[in-house]
Amino acid sequence: METETVDNHQYAWLSEVLPREPQRVLDVGCGRGELAAELMRRGHEVTAIDISQEAVDAARAAGVPAIQADIVKYPDVAAPGPDAAAPGPDAAAPGPDAAAPGPDAAAPGPGGAHPGSAVRGYDDGSLFDVVVMSLSLHHLHPLEAALDRVRTLLVDGGLLLVDEFAWDWADRAAATWFYDAGSLLAAAGVADFTREPGRIGHDPVERWREAHADHTPAAEMLAALEERFEVTSVRREPYLSRYLGGKLAEGGSADIVEELWRIERDRLAAGALPPTGFRMTARTM
């Protein structure tokens, strides 16, 4: 990779932890579909879901066949795609003598596919070899129910990849750096970032806590993950620059993001800033 953009950092990590052979992957909270599109480009069979219809529409526009669904209920409740055909008026209903499926019949997989069509085959009734959760877990409530569902959707020994925001690890130095950098980017006209002119002395830690009160803390996420999966690695990572990169105006310079990343990474190495993100790999027990 020629440049180390924020996405490239994530993609490089995925290159390390994902098997090279095609996997059946569930992308939970796919957003606008960038990650799902990259996984598809690499040859994986991807099912992308998001609870937001707006995100699903954007992902579909980008060529990702996303599904509107809540992970807690998926795949029992999932909105069909816009091209799904409704039964015609002449469609016959099952007759009274139609045989009910036997107790050993497997449930259909996403999109109606039988789980036996999974790349590595049907295993223990589960559907996916890999579940990827990129910046979605801290938004999911109830957390425990979401992770319980993820566990049931993974094959025995399946891989869970979590790329997350650890907002509760931020200290005063981190909050101050974030808001100062964001204000400068907004003043330069390159970022959609709320400045607070006239609020001299507003405590950045208080502002940070107020802004993220509805986000699940990393400590709770990690504890819930460790209860349900065999955690194989946890990397504490920079995240503030990635956060700011998401606020750059459309067409914003990748050079700005990379410079912010470099500064944050250097401050972490020097102990002047804490990590505010983590990347975790885990297996079903």
Image: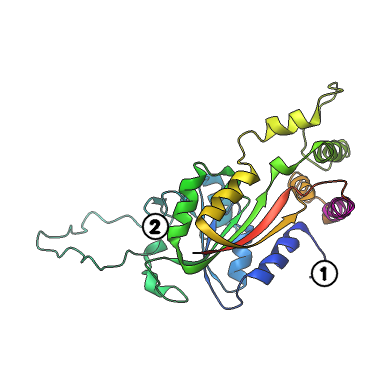
Q: Nearer the viewer, residue 165 or 235?
A: 235
79 sits left or right of 17 in the view:
left
Q: Which residue is mark 2?
A: 84
Residue 276 position, x and y percent, is 74, 47
Amino acid carrying mark 1 in the image: Glu
Read off the magenta span: 255-270
Question: Does the magenta portion include 263?
Answer: yes
Q: Position of residue 159 (x, y in %)?
A: 55, 66
Which mark lies nearer to you, 2 or 1? 1
Left or right of 80: which side holds 259? right
185 left or right of 39 in image: right
Between 200 and 157, the one nearer to me in the picture: 157
Q: Is residue 29 visible?
A: no
The disc label shown at residue 2, or none: 1
Place of residue 45 in the rendered image (x, y in percent of width and height, measured from the top left)? 52, 70
Mark 2 belongs to which amino acid? Ala
* Residue pictured at 44% horizontal, 48% vertical: 72
Residue at far left of view? 97
Q: Residue at x 18, y 59 (%)?
A: 92
